[in-house]
Amino acid sequence: MSIIHEKKFVKLSPFIHDTLRLVIILCVIGAFVKDSHDLRYRQSTPEKSNHRSVISVAKRASERANTKVKMASLLQSLLDPKKNWLAAQHMKTISKRLRNFGLRYDDLYDPYYDLDIKEALDRLPREIVDARNQRLKRAMDLSMKHEYLPEDLQAMQTPFRNYLQDMLALVKREKAEREALGALPLYQRTIP
C-alpha cells in the first residue's frame, strides 16, 4: 500500500498498513452504528412535539446507554484476537517485532508519560524491574547495531507475558478510590 504525498509515493511498512486497515474498519463500523442510532432516534421522536415527558427523556437516555454498551462490546469483540482475524494478525505482527528485540509488551510502558506506571514500577520487586531494564538496554543496543536477536533466543521470548498489568490496575483503583473519597492525590505531575 502506498499513499501520495506531494506527488511522491511513500511506501508504508506492513505494520502501519495493518494498523491503517484496522482504523478504517473501526471508523466504518462506528459510522454505521451512529447512523442506525440516529435513524432509530428520529423514528422514535414524534413530529413537532414540544412537550417532552420525563419518561420519554429517561427512555431515550437508557436507549443511548444501551447503544454505548453495545458499541463497547462490539469494539471489544473487534479487538479480541480470538474473535477477529485482523486483530489476531495485528497481535502476531506486534509479537514478531517484540521477539526481534527480546522485549515484552509491558516494557513499552513509559514511566515518564504516566505517573501511575511509575508508581506501579516502584511497587514491583527489584528483580522484575532489573530484568525489564536489561531487556530495554539489550533492545536499544540491538537497534543501534541494526541487528535482531538470534533465532534460538527469539523462540524463547514471551512478549505477552504480563508483569505490570496487575500492579497497574491496583494503582489505578487506589487512585480512583482516593479521588472518590475526596483525598489529595499521592503524586502530582511537576514540570522538570
Image (cartoon, rainbow, N blue to C red):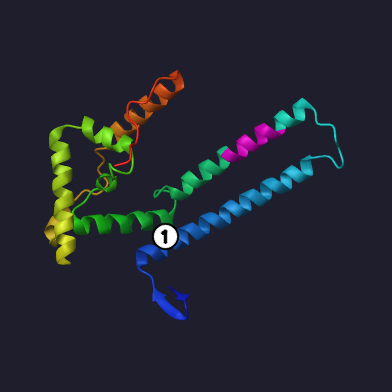
Task: Kindly tell me whether residue 26 is visible in this rendering.
Answer: yes
Q: Could you tell me the amino acid type at mark 1?
A: Thr
Residue 122, quarter of picture: top left
Task: Kindly tell me whether residue 148 is visible in this rendering.
Answer: no
The residue range painted magenta reads: 60-68
Q: Name the side, left or right, on which 45 lies relative to 127.
A: right
Q: Name the side, left or right, on which 96 lies relative to 150.
A: right
Q: Which residue ends up furthest to the bottom in the rendered image?
A: 7
- Numbered disc total: 1
Q: Which residue is mark 1?
A: 19
Viewer-nearest residue: 26 or 140: 140
**4 w.r.t. 172: above or below:** below
Q: Name the side, left or right, on which 188 lies relative to 33.
A: left
Residue at left 44%, top 20%?
A: 182
Quarter the C terminus occupies: top left
User: Residue 21 lies in magenta, yes or no?
Assistant: no
Image location of residue 150, percent across then percent down? 12, 61
Residue 86, quarter of picture: bottom left
Image location of residue 107, percent across then percent down? 24, 46
Residue at left 42%, top 60%?
A: 19
SS at circle 1: helix
Quarter the N terminus occupies: bottom left
Viewer-nearest residue: 160 or 57: 57
